[in-house]
Amino acid sequence: NLILAFESSADETSASVVKNGHIILSNIVATQIASHQRFGGIVPEVASRHHLEWIDRVTQEALMQAHITDPETQLSAVAATFGPGLVGSLLIGLMAGKTFAMVHNLPFIGVNHLAGHISAANFVKATVYPAMAIMVSGGHTELVWMAKENVFQIIGTTLDDAAGEAFDKVGRILGLKYPAGKEMQEMAQKGHADIHFPIAHTEADFDFSFSGLKSAVLNYVHHEKQLDRTINKNDVAASFQKAVIEAIIEKVTLAIEKFQPQQLLLGGGVAANLALRCAVEDLAMKYQLVLTEAPIELSGDNAAMIGAAAFLAYKQKHFSGLDLNVDPSLNFTRM
Ligand code: ATP
Ligand code: MG
Ligand code: FE
C-alpha cells in the first residue's frame, strides 16, 4: 500500500509517499518560516501564495524520490489535510490532492491535521488500544482518547493559548524570532528553573490554560525592568518551560488514572521538546505504559504524518468525495 499525501495547513508545503502507514519513501517539506519571521507570525496571504508556488515542486520531488513513475498502478490512494488550519493554505494542498486523485483515478482521503500529528508516532511503533494521545502543537493542546484505531475523542483541551503558542509568545517577550519553541528549549537548557511562574488550575479535570502563565512571564519581565534589574533570559525560559511541562504532566496523570489507557502517544510540534519528552517518558515508566513519541523530525508539520493517518482510514475503506471542502476549524468531538 502506497499513499501520496499532502500537507499545507500552515506554513509548510509538503508531499510524501508512505508505505503501509509506517514506512517513509519520501517526505519533502518546503518551509516558509523566513518569509513570516519579520512579521512575528504567519501572514495568511503570504502563506497561501507560497503554497501555490511550491506545491508542484514538492509533489514532483516526492514522487521521484519514491520512484513513482506510474501513479495509477503504483499508488493505492491520495490523501490531503482538509483542516484545521488557514483556509487559503489548506485549499492549495486539498486541491492538489483531489486533482491528483481525479487525474490518476485513485481514491481520495481527507485527513484531520491533528490525527496526522498523533499518527506520526506510528513511524516508531504500532499503537495498542485503548490509547491516549498528548497532542501539543502551535495551535492546539489536547488530550485525545482513542478507544480503537482511527477513532479520536477529546478528553481535554486548552481553554486559551496552545502550548506552542505560549512558547512563541513568551519567546517574543524575550526578543526571540518566531517560532520560538526550539530556541526557548536551548535557552532553558542553559538556565535555572528557579523563578516561580504559577500554573493555572482549570476547573474541568483535563483542560489546560496557558495564557495566565504567559502573563506571569510578562509581568515578571516588566517588574524586573522597572527595578532596573537585568533579567536572565535563560532562567526565564527554563522556569517557563518547567511550568508548561508540569501543567501538562499534571493533567495527563489525572487522565491516565481515570481512563487507564494501554498506550500513550506524544505528537505535535511541541513534542520535539526534549524536556517534555523526558517528563512524559518518566510518567509512562511510572505507570508502566507503552509510549510512542513522534520522531523529533516528524513532530512539526509534514505530509508523511498525513500519509500515516490516511492509512488508518484506508484500512477501513473510509474514503472522501472529491467535493470535500476545507474545514479551518475542524477538530475531534469531545468525549
Ligand atoms: P497546529 O498543528 O495546531 O495546527 P501548527 O501546525 O502551526 O499548529 P506545529 O507545526 O505542529 O504547529 O508546531 C509548531 C509549534 O511547535 C510552534 O509553536 C513551535 O514553537 C513549537 N515547537 C517546535 N519545537 C519546539 C521545541 N523544541 N520546544 C517547544 N516548542 C517547540
Ligand atoms: Mg508550522
Ligand atoms: Fe501542526
Image (cartoon, rainbow, N blue to C red):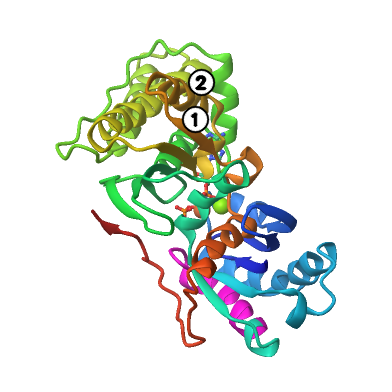
Q: In the rendered view of the protein, which quadrant contains the N terminus? A: bottom right
Seen at 63% across and 67% down, the residue is 5
Q: Position of residue 330 (x, y in %)?
A: 37, 66
Q: Is residue 51 above or below residue 31?
A: below
Circles 2 and 1 in contact, beta carbons < 8 Å: yes
Say which of 266 and 291 sits in front: 291
To which residue does mark 2 refer?
A: 233
Q: Amino acid at mark 1?
A: Leu
Whichever of callouts 2 and 1 sits on the residue coming sooner in the sequence is: 1
Task: Using residue 237 as the reference point, say whether residue 211 is left or right of it.
Answer: left
Under circle 2, the secondary element is: helix
**Residue 98 belongs to magenta span:** yes
Query: Which image quarter: residue 29?
Result: bottom right
Q: How many marks?
A: 2
Seen at 62% across and 40% down, the residue is 295
Query: Which image quarter: residue 76?
Result: bottom right
- Regarding residue 242, the answer to whether it shows in the image is yes
- Bounds of the magenta segment: 82-100
Seen at 69% across and 53% down, the residue is 23
Give the distance between the C-alpha atoms of the residues marked 2 and 1, in whole angstroms: 7 Å
Seen at 74% across and 82% down, the residue is 72
Under circle 1, the secondary element is: loop
Q: Position of residue 240 (x, y in %)?
A: 41, 24
Q: Position of residue 55 (x, y in %)?
A: 69, 71
Q: Is residue 322 above or below residue 18?
A: below
**Residue at the extreme left:** 203
Q: Main secondary structure of the magenta part?
A: helix
To which residue does mark 1 refer?
A: 174
